[in-house]
Image (cartoon, helix red, strand yellow):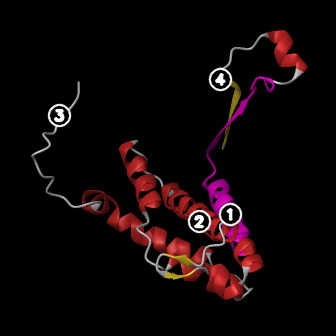
Amino acid sequence: MGVVIPLEEKIQESGIDGLLALVTADMDRVNQTILSRAASDVSMIPEVANHLISSGGKRLRPMLTLAAAGLCGYTGAGHIKLAASVEFMHTATLLHDDVVDESDMRRGKLAARMLWGNEASVLVGDFLLGQAFKMMVEVGSLLVSTFSPPPPPSSPKARSCNFPPRRILKPARTITLR
């Protein structure tokens, strides 16, 4: 069953307002977590991180994480850390991308690399990734799947096994960590 929305009909809600209404209370907790986890004894780390974190992003990824937790009936507190970790991963990739792409601007402001240099941007991105993974581990319930992909098509083993050009990977085993 599908839903058809006529093209002439205008949607009353603008953008992400409906989503924001669902997650506002939790987003305050996510923002507090982001600020506290960006802290470091190395003063440059929070400076660089906060430069990008406070530059006006929508926080769509953490909002979607919170909404997904709600849709799945999750009632714990782990979704706050997971939402913050998603935002840290996104922020880290932006820091790294600006270095790789040699970008001068990000969200209407000078890119962090222009203010602190490429090395600082990469290292702070790495710090944020580390914090993201730390928060994911702290949640304490991770599903880990290992896959056994076919060998590359150019390898002799692949030619002798006649693997099809596309193969759907299925978990070889699944482990739940608690």
Say few, some or many: other residues with alpha carbon within 10 Å of mark 2 (under 14 / 14 to 19 / 20 or more).
many
Q: CA distance from mark 3 to mark 4?
A: 34 Å
Element type at mark 2: helix
Name the residue rendered at 65%, 84% in the picture. 114
Q: Going by the image, does 166 lie left or right of 41? A: left
Mark closer to the chain start, 3 or 2: 3
Mark closer to the chain start, 1 or 4: 1
On the question of residue 51 being in view, the answer is yes
Q: CA distance from mark 4 to mark 2?
A: 29 Å
Q: Which residue is mark 2?
A: 88
Depth check, front residue: 146 or 159: 159
Mark closer to the chain start, 2 or 1: 2
Q: Are marks 2 and 1 in contact (CB under 8 Å)?
A: yes
Q: Amino acid at mark 4?
A: Lys
Q: CA distance from mark 1 to mark 4?
A: 27 Å
Depth check, front residue: 70 or 111: 111
Q: Are marks 3 and 1 in contact (CB under 8 Å)?
A: no
Q: Which residue is mark 3?
A: 4
Q: CA distance from mark 3 to mark 2?
A: 37 Å
Element type at mark 4: loop
Q: CA distance from mark 2 to mark 1?
A: 6 Å
Quarter of the image for the N terminus: give it. Answer: top left
Q: Which residue is mark 4?
A: 170
Say few, some or many: other residues with alpha carbon within 10 Å of mark 4 (under 14 / 14 to 19 / 20 or more).
few
Magenta segment includes 40: no
Residue 129: which disc? 1
